Amino acid sequence: LAIARDLKPAAFVIEGLSGLAGVALAEHHLAEAMDLVVTYIDDLAGTSIAQVAEPYRVYLTSYHVFQANEDERGQMILGDAYRLLQEQANKISDEGTRWSFLRNIPAHREVVMEFERAESVQGDGRMVER
């Protein structure tokens, strides 16, 4: 972890740190999960998503860690993931294939669902009926 903080994490390091953050989160080690995410989060934006094998899984793990720690950066990360996903989806001309890209890949589907859920929450925290 100390070495990763000193280096600009490459895509494979970002994925590894994200995986460790996911494990820490699953074990309810919120501070450890946060330390791991903070190590790579600034570099995630500067890394081409083409270099990351599962970029949306990394974004989702980061989002969940921020949410669990009640850190407002979670919404920013989720918005970034959704925007990037939509940019990719909009390059697909066939509507059925685009729908499949957004809904049949588990990480993509979760980004869309989390974003839509977050968008449906009003400022007072109540869910809005859709």
Image (tube, grey):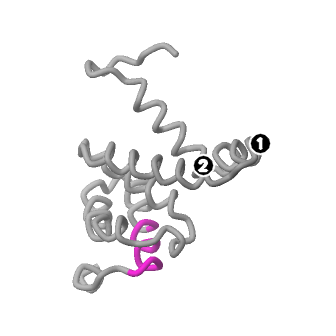
Q: Secondary structure at mark 2?
A: loop
Specify the amino acid type for callout 1: Gly
Q: Position of residue 40 (x, y in %)?
A: 32, 70
Query: Badge 1, how many Cα within 10 Å: few under 14, some, many 20+?
Result: few
- Most foreground residue, 111 or 83: 83
Label 1 secondary element: helix
Q: Is residue 121 left or right of residue 60?
A: left
Taking the magenta stretch, the answer to whether it contains residue 16 is yes
Q: Where is residue 94? Give x, y as percent.
A: 75, 47
Q: Callout 2: few (<14), some (14-19), or many (20+) C-alpha neighbours within 10 Å?
A: few
Marks 1 and 2 sit apart, C-alpha to C-alpha, by 12 Å
Which one is closest to the eye, mark 1 or mark 2?
2
- Compared with residue 27, is residue 127 higher up or lower down, i.e. above or below? above
Magenta part of the protein: which range? Answer: 10-19
**Three-letter amino acid code of the residue under disc 2:** Asn
- What residue do we see at 45% from left, 77% from top? 11
